[in-house]
Amino acid sequence: MLAPEIHRAKRAILIGYITNGIALGSFISRIPDYKRILHVTDGRLGSALVFGSIGVVLALGPAGRNAAKYGSKPLIVGSAVAVGVTIPGIGLLFNIYTLAISLFLWGITLGIQDISLSAHGVALEQKSGTKMLSTMHAMYSLGSIIGVGTGGVIAQLGISPLIHLSNLGVLLILSAFVINPLLLPANMDQHNPEGHKRNRKRPGIFWILGLLGVCAAISEGIASDWGGVLARDTYGASPFVASLPYALFSTLMVIGRLSGDKLSHRFGTSRLLTAGGLIAGIGLATGMLMHSIQGEFLGWFFLGVGVSAVIPLLMSAAGEIASKQYPDTIAPSEAVAMIAGISYFAFIAAPPMIGFLSDQITLRYALFVPAGLALLMAFGARYARSSDR
């Protein structure tokens, strides 16, 4: 049984992940409206979306170092407020350039929140001796379902993105005051920054885990950024129906992540990655070959099953490896940030890549690329066997 302070802190992290997911899901639900309001092509929309990912990735390294130096608690509370403050900006929609700038600033806050929550979660795992990070990330997916579902209804009602996201921002700020007293003190996961030389070569296992995460992140990215556009533009779905593929994807992400901690104990990370890559790759390709809204739902279903637990399990493994095998080289929070930084680079590359390919060969055919990368993840999973020991 978990100690009371561990249980409270876990509850705080679960709340933090839910609000993070609600924020992102709400934004995702309005992406088709951005295209309609701004009158832009898939390629230009993809180029703007990438700035949010750039903000996230640029924030990860500094967030990991500062979580090691000051503890993850102050970063969790501060970033929760910052996400709420910046989210109304992505609803202004003056033009494609202001959208890109707003997404960049908002992305920075999301990146800090993501790493600080994961760092606190990894510390709780090590303190309690219990796997819990995959379950925590399941709450992010649950939040995404809430965000994209309510956002689809709000979009159907014709409420503007600015009004929608401004009201959401207030709720996100309030959440910071709820979780603050529940978290463990900052010194719980502080590490001496002088003991981790930034110019020291990082062990190769972290690069391998990060590259495996790239394939999963690309699948997550296309499920969120392009599901609504594919449903509306290719299959003529209504705004509400267009929000449902991602809601389905997020539902499967919740189920998969709630099961991920137990499955990793039973089968090991490398086997889960192999099975997940095969399911996601074959399922998405099959769905696109069907060329129908039913096919999109099928593809998004198997994407959710296949990639659900990949990134949290990779982060958990990285934190454990850093703590036990490389304590004088890299702090667990820095290891988590490194895995996230490599993996989330996919969020920078995927939107413009898919957008460009969509302009050339249609969005449906462009989605065979992430299907192939998911299969590549299955092939490369054998290199992660060392993390199972």
Image (cartoon, grey):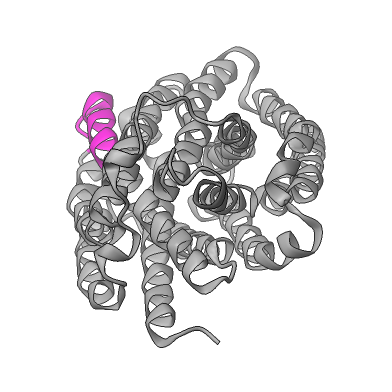
Task: Name the image quarter holding residue 384.
Answer: top right
User: Looking at the rendering, which quadrant does residue 362 occupy?
Assistant: top right
Residue at 25 percent of width and 44 percent of height? 91
Q: Could you say where residue 51 lies in the image, as x and y percent from the top left?
A: 34, 28
Left or right: 165, with 383 as reference point? left
Picture quarter with the N terminus: bottom right
Work out whether residue 82 or residue 272 is closer to the camera in this orientation and state it: 272
Residue sitting at x 28%, y 26%: 96
Up/down of 120 relative to 85, above or below? below
Q: Is residue 238 visible?
A: no
Query: In terms of depth relative to the viewer, which is nearer, 385 or 92?
Result: 385
Per the picture, the main secondary structure of the magenta-coloured stretch is helix
Residue 387 to residue 22: above or below? above
Q: Which segment is the magenta one? A: 93-107
Q: Is residue 94 magenta?
A: yes
Residue in the image at 76% along x and 45% along y: 270
